[in-house]
Image (tube, coloured by chain):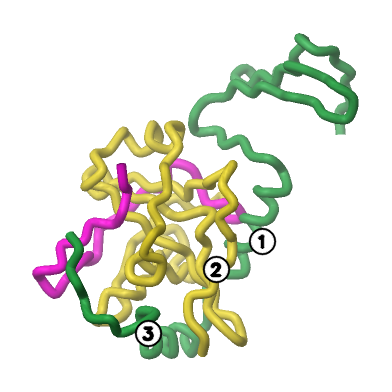
Amino acid sequence: MLVLTRRAGESVMIGDDVVITVLEARGDVIRLGIQAPRDVRVHREEIYRELQAANREAASPTDAVVEELSRTLRPPSDQGDAGTQ
Amino acid sequence: MSTQAVSRTHGDQMITTIPTIHLAAPMPGFPAHTRFALVRLNDEGLLYAFTSLDNPELRFLVVPPDPFFENYTPEIPDEALALLGYPEAEDVITMLVITAGKEATAANLLAPIVINTVNRMAVQVVLAGTDMPVRAILNRK
């Protein structure tokens, strides 16, 4: 991991297109501003990791699972379609 | 402004197979897969496979939020709308990735897959800043 020290108001560039700026540093809490092209997704790491894990867990269920869900997936209650369109 | 799935229910086909869908950004955990197809798996239109065209061994089971989560109207962040080409609300469909567990099936409300049916761009949108669960129980086996 590359370690850099910055003060509030200073920035780090990643490649040509990503800029991370320390907006405010108050005790334990650091506010960061991130500029990146829109196809570069920026997330809090723990959210990203959680989503990554959830996607991996969801990926490629077995045919048996698919078949069962196909049969059993039902709306929560049979309250009759009121058709609220 | 609701971004609910298109719900033209006067026909029996709510959503039919849509040819190649392009992910504007890959799904977290699967950086190599950007081309997908949406395949309807049951007659009620409640279960679909989101299958990778880059490697068909990879697929996700997805469901429309309706009728499972009736008040689910996620606000799509601007960055995602930009990636999708700023679709009209009625051109957007939303799908939730589901995971079959031993006890129950869970849907990911935190990161829906949002599809622009006109240009067929899609993205898995992370609803950051909300407290949407990544695992919301869908039904009990």
Q: Which numbered disc, 3 or 2, marks the residue closer to the eye? A: 2
Q: Main secondary structure of the magenta part?
A: loop
Amino acid type indicated by mark 2: Ala
Q: Are marks 3 and 2 on the same chain?
A: no
Q: Which residues are magenta?
A: B1-30
Chain letter of the residue beneath label 2 in the structure image = B
Gap between marks 3 and 1, in whole Å? Answer: 24 Å
If the image is split into quadrants, where does the C terminus of chain A sit? bottom left
For marks 3 and 1, the one nearer the N-term is: 1
Same chain under badges 3 and 1? The reply is yes
Q: Chain of mark 3?
A: A
Q: Is residue A58 above or below residue A11?
A: below
Marking on residue A70:
3
Chain B takes which shade in the image? Answer: yellow
* Left or right: B110, with B21 as reference point: right
Question: Regarding mark 2 in the picture, which secondary structure is present there?
Answer: strand
Q: Say which chain tag 1 marks.
A: A
Is residue A78 highlighted in magenta? no
The letter of the green chain is: A
Pointers 2 and 1 in contact (C-beta within 8 Å)? no
Q: CA distance from mark 3 to mark 2?
A: 19 Å
Q: Can you tell which mark lies on residue A53?
A: 1
Give the residue at x 56% y 47%. Answer: B130
Tally of marks = 3
**Mark 2 = which residue?**
B136
